Amino acid sequence: MKTIKNLNIENKKVIIRCDFNVPIKDNKIVDDTRIKGALETINYCLEKNCKVILLSHLGRIKEESDLAKNNLAPVAKRLAELLNKDILFCEKTRGPELEAMVESLEAKDVLLIQNTRYEDLEGKKESKNDPELGAYWASLGDVFINDAFGTIHRAHASNVGIASNIESAFGFLIERELNALSLLNRPEHPFIVILGGAKVADKIGVIENLVTKADKILIGGGMAFTFLKAKGLEVGKSLIDEENIEFCKNILNNYQEKIILPVDFAVTNEFNNDEEYRLKDIDSIAANEMGLDIGSKTLTLFENILKEAAIVIWNGPLGVYEFDKYKKNTDELLKYVVANNIKTILGGGDIVAAATSAGYKDKVYHASTGGGATLEYLEGKKLPGIEAIK
Ligand code: AMP
């Protein structure tokens, strides 16, 4: 892997693609985790006396009215506080003002350029990787560091475009992500996959890619019901993905030994947090009931399998974790893998959100920060942002 440490960046103008796509409300940053995630690479460049030029997207820009709410100015302010130094901010994504600011940079200066997606307003130049835009941004620096894992599955001008024009490498954040996720390419055994979340449809690629490599796939969450229905069981009003019952049947036929389904659930009559729930075995769910969390017997079943695991990848919560009542067994299983030091990688999105709110995110072996990017990696796809630098 080509990382920042393999490049001679001393005294150079370094362009870093960061992921500053943070939630902002009333001009205030609600969660600065992603900004903090970029500090290691930025600080390393400052130690090497670089002139640092930062690029990031923020939200989506479809029309004029999207510009103001997706302005990166609040990020520049927060970054200045975190780095404890002045940050130069250019309101424009190109042009004489930007070029003059780049020209006047001195060693250890940091310049943040406006939201790269401002370039999407006319002709989606950033998101469609307009070759002229990538070449223009590349012309502002000597070397390029990609440290935005969240967009690595996309070919944009600010990642693939720049990387195609100047010497490039990955930053520390991406290096950590790829080091952890690549353990799944030739996994130690037993290799256990935990899949949860809402729909089978979203996980088909992941199942197809991992079912051949894994020793067991433990299935929870809403998606378990489509598998159970495919086996001919009554699942009441639980979430069903009708279009994928056939897919589940095929997986169950071909990999009978590997697929482990829940044996009980916390069931209720309405989709809310107020109604009472009861625990029911899978063969006794009534027509007017829905399962919103795995049950305690399933928790024990999963724990017994995980006990032996050499490595675990977990994507998707096992219940409706947004409701206090139904996050219980997602939290319990997180607690179990942490307490037993089971090498577990959380595969982005909702399971990382669940682990964060339960306080386990920093205690697991690795919590991947990319939503779509992590999922595409787990599907075994080649990701353009990786290919462009590899
Ligand atoms: P995903 O983005 O596919 O990981 O799905 C996460 C979503 O799945 C969360 O919003 C959960 O509330 C939802 N979910 C998990 N278990 C269930 C369930 N038993 N019934 C309905 N939704 C569920």
Image (tube, rainbow, N blue to C red):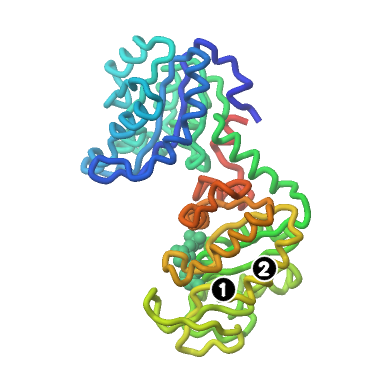
Q: Are marks 2 and 1 in contact (CB under 8 Å)?
A: yes
Q: Is residue 44 left or right of residue 120?
A: right
Question: Label 2: how many residues lie within 10 Å, few (<14), some (14-19) or many (20+)?
Answer: many
Looking at the image, residue 236 lies above or below residue 103: below
Most distant residue in the front direction: 339
Dot 2 corresponds to which residue? 302
Q: Quadrant of residue 54?
A: top left
Q: Quadrant of residue 306?
A: bottom right
Residue at point 48% right, 52% down? 356
Q: Nearer the viewer, residue 154 or 80?
A: 80
Dot 1 corresponds to which residue? 294
Q: Is residue 86 left or right of residue 264?
A: left
Picture coordinates of residue 112, whole percent (x, y): 36, 25
Q: Nearer the viewer, residue 25 or 169?
A: 25
Q: Quadrant of the C terminus?
A: top right
SS at circle 1: strand
Picture coordinates of residue 322, whole percent (x, y): 42, 64
Tag 1: amino acid? Ile
Looking at the image, residue 263 lies above or below residue 5: below
Is the CB of mark 2 within 8 Å of ligand 1? Answer: no
Res. 124 visible in picture: yes
Q: Quadrant of the N terminus?
A: top right
Residue at point 37% right, 12% down? 105
Label located before the other in sequence (2 or 1): 1
Picture coordinates of residue 164, whole percent (x, y): 53, 26
